[in-house]
Image (cartoon, helix red, strand yellow):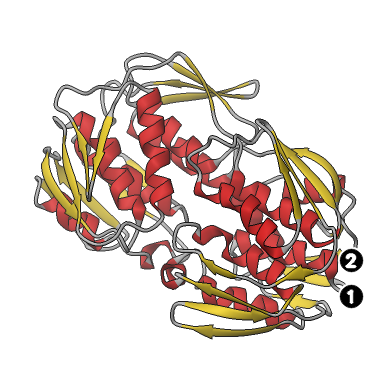
C-alpha cells in the first residue's frame, strides 16, 4: 500500500491525541491498584492496545467505555500468561519487571525489530533479584519472583529500563535504582514518577538514583485523564511552522513530556509559536533559519525536526542521536533516507546528522514501517514541489491511528489512506 500526499499547507485546529507514554503508565498502575480506575483517553493507538492485551493476559479486566477504558486490577495472576508485545518496546520493557514482581511464569514474544532491541542490562538486574530467564532475547520465558533492594542500570541505553523497574518496585518491597551512566531521555522517567504519584506512590529522586520506599502501594484515584501527546502534536505544529498555521488543543505546558520542547525549537527555527494552558499554535511567518539541536532528551522529534531543517536556510546540526539506531527503524539512517528521497541534503554520522536547507522536490519515501518516518514524510509534503509517495503509510497506527484523517481536516491532500 502506498499513500500519495500532494503539496498543500496545513491550517486549522485539532485536538491532541492521547499520549501513549502517559497511557502505558496509567494502564499499568491501574492494573496494579487497589480498585477499578476509569482512564479517559482521546484515541487508542496500536501500542496502547498492546499494553492492554498484555495486562489482560496477566489477569486484569479492561473494557472499552465512551472516551476511554475501565481497568479492573489484577487479582490472581493468570497461569503461564503469554505476553505478545508485537513491536512495542515500552510494553516489553515496562511489563518484564512487572510480570516478574507478580511472580508470573510468563512468556514474552514480539516481532519486527523488537527482538533486536536491547534488554540485556535490565534482564541481568532482574536475574540478580530472583528472576530466571530462558533466553537473553525474545522469545523468552521468565520464572521466579522479583525481590526488591539495590539495582544498577546504565542511563544511556534506554530510560525504559528505569521506568519498568520503578513500576515494579511497589510490588516487591521497594528499593533503589542507581544510574551508572548519565540518564538520557530523562523526561520519560519524569512521566513515570508523575503517574506513580497520581496513584499514591512517591519516588524519591537524587543525584543518580531513584528510590521507592517499602510499604508503597498503588491506590486508584477512581477516575483519571491521560495527557494529550506532545510527540504527536509535533508533526502538525511543524507543518504549521513550515507553511501554514496550526493549533493543537489539549496540551499541557506543565506536562513532564520532554517533547513539549517542540514549541521552543520551532521558535529557534524562526516560526511563531503561541502557548497557553491548553493549546499551542505554530505559524509560518517568513524564512526559517538553521540551528543546532541536541536530541538526547527528545529522540522521537528527530525525523520531523529534520524535515523542518530541510526548509531552513543554512546547516542544522543534530547531535545526541546514537540511541536512535535502536528504534522501530535505524532512525538516523531512515531519517536521512527520507530527506534524500525528497531531494534534501543530509550527512549522517555516528551520533547524528547535518541537514542543509534546500527546496524539497518530492519523491518516493520508504517508511521502513516506522510511524515517525511516515508522519514526517507527510509533513514534508506541505513544502515539496511535487507529490510525496509513502510506502506502508498505515504504520502510523502504532502511535496515531487518525493521523491522516487529522491531516485532511487541516487541508492536507492525502490519497490512498
Q: In this view, does 233 lie to the left or right of 51?
A: right
Instruction: Write the residue at 73% across / 79% down.
Output: 357
Whether residue 115 is visible: yes
Q: Report crowding for label 1: few under 14, some 14 to 19, many 20 or more residues within 10 A (C-alpha).
A: some
Q: Mark 2 points at which residue?
A: 7
Residue 344: image location, x then y, percent = 73, 82
How far across and down, in percent of the image, does residue 155 sit? 29, 58
Say the numbered circle drawn on residue 386.
1
Q: Is 27 on the left-hand or right-hand side of 82?
A: right
Helix, strand, or loop for circle 1?
loop
Q: In this view, does 319 lie above or below 163?
A: below
* Rendered location of residue 253, percent (x, y): 59, 37
Image coords of residue 179 (percent x, y) = 22, 54
Pick the residue in front: 200 or 5. Answer: 200
Give the camera-side residue of 366 and 157. 157
Q: Do the residues labelled 1 and 2 touch (CB within 8 Å)?
A: yes
Relative to 223, residue 9 above or below: below
Q: How many marks?
A: 2
Mark before the other along the chain sequence, 1 or 2: 2
What mark, if any, has residue 112 been given in the picture? none
Instruction: Reply above or below: 23 against 294.
Output: above
Amino acid at each position: 500500500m502506498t499513500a500519495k500526499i500532494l503539496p498543500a499547507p496545513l491550517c486549522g485546529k485539532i485536538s491532541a491525541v492521547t499520549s501513549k507514554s502517559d497511557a502505558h503508565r496509567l494502564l499499568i498502575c491501574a492494573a496494579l491498584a487497589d480498585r477499578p480506575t476509569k482512564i479517559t483517553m482521546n484515541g487508542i493507538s496500536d501500542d496502547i492496545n498492546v499494553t492492554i492485551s498484555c495486562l489482560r493476559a496477566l489477569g486484569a479486566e479492561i473494557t472499552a467505555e465512551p472516551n476511554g477504558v475501565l481497568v479492573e486490577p489484577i487479582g490472581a495472576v493468570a497461569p503461564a500468561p503469554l505476553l505478545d508485545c508485537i513491536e512495542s518496546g515500552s510494553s516489553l520493557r515496562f511489563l518484564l519487571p512487572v510480570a516478574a514482581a507478580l511472580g508470573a511464569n510468563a512468556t514474552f514474544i514480539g516481532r519486527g525489530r523488537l527482538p533486536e532491541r536491547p534488554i540485556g542490562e535490565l534482564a541481568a538486574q532482574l536475574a540478580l533479584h530472583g528472576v530466571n530467564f530462558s533466553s537473553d532475547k525474545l522469545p523468552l520465558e521468565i520464572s521466579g519472583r522479583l525481590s526488591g533492594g539495590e539495582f544498577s542500570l546504565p542511563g544511556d541505553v534506554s530510560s525504559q529500563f528505569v521506568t519498568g523497574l520503578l513500576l515494579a518496585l511497589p510490588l516487591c518491597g521497594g528499593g533503589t535504582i542507581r544510574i551508572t551512566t548519565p540518564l538520557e531521555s530523562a523526561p520519560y522517567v519524569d512521566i513515570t514518577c508523575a503517574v506513580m504519584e497520581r496513584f499514591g506512590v512517591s519516588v524519591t529522586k537524587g543525584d543518580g538514583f531513584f528510590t521507592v520506599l517499602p510499604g508503597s502501594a498503588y491506590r486508584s484515584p477512581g477516575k483519571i485523564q491521560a495527557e494529550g501527546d506532545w510527540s504527536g502534536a509535533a508533526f502538525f505544529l511543524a507543518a504549521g511552522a513550515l507553511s501554514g498555521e496550526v493549533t493543537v488543543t489539549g496540551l499541557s505546558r506543565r506536562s513532564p513530556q520532554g517533547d513539549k520542547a517542540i514549541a521552543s525549537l520551532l521558535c529557534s527555527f524562526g516560526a511563531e509559536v503561541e502557548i497557553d494552558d491548553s493549546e499551542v499554535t505554530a505559524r509560518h511567518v517568513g524564512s526559517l533559519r538553521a540551528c543546532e539541536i541536541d536530541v538526547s532528551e527528545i529522540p522521537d522529534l528527530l525525523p520531523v525536526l529534520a524535515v523542518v531543517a530541510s526548509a531552513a536556510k543554512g546547516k542544522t546540526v543534530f547531535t545526541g542521536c546514537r540511541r536512535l539506531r535502536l528504534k522501530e527503524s535505524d532512525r538516523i539512517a531512515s531519517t536521512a533516507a527520507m530527506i534524500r528521497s525528497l531531494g534534501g541534503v543530509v550527512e549522517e554520522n555516528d551520533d547524528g546528522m547535518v541537514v542543509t536547507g534546500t527546496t524539497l522536490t518530492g519523491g518516493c519515501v520508504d517508511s521502513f514501517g516506522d510511524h515517525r518516518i511516515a508522519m514526517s514524510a507527510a509533513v514534508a509534503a506541505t513544502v515539496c514541489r511535487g507529490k510525496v509517495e509513502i510506502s506502508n503509510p498505515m504504520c502510523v497506527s502504532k502511535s496515531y491511528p487518525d493521523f491522516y484523517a487529522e491531516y485532511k481536516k487541516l487541508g492536507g491532500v492525502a490519497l490512498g489512506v
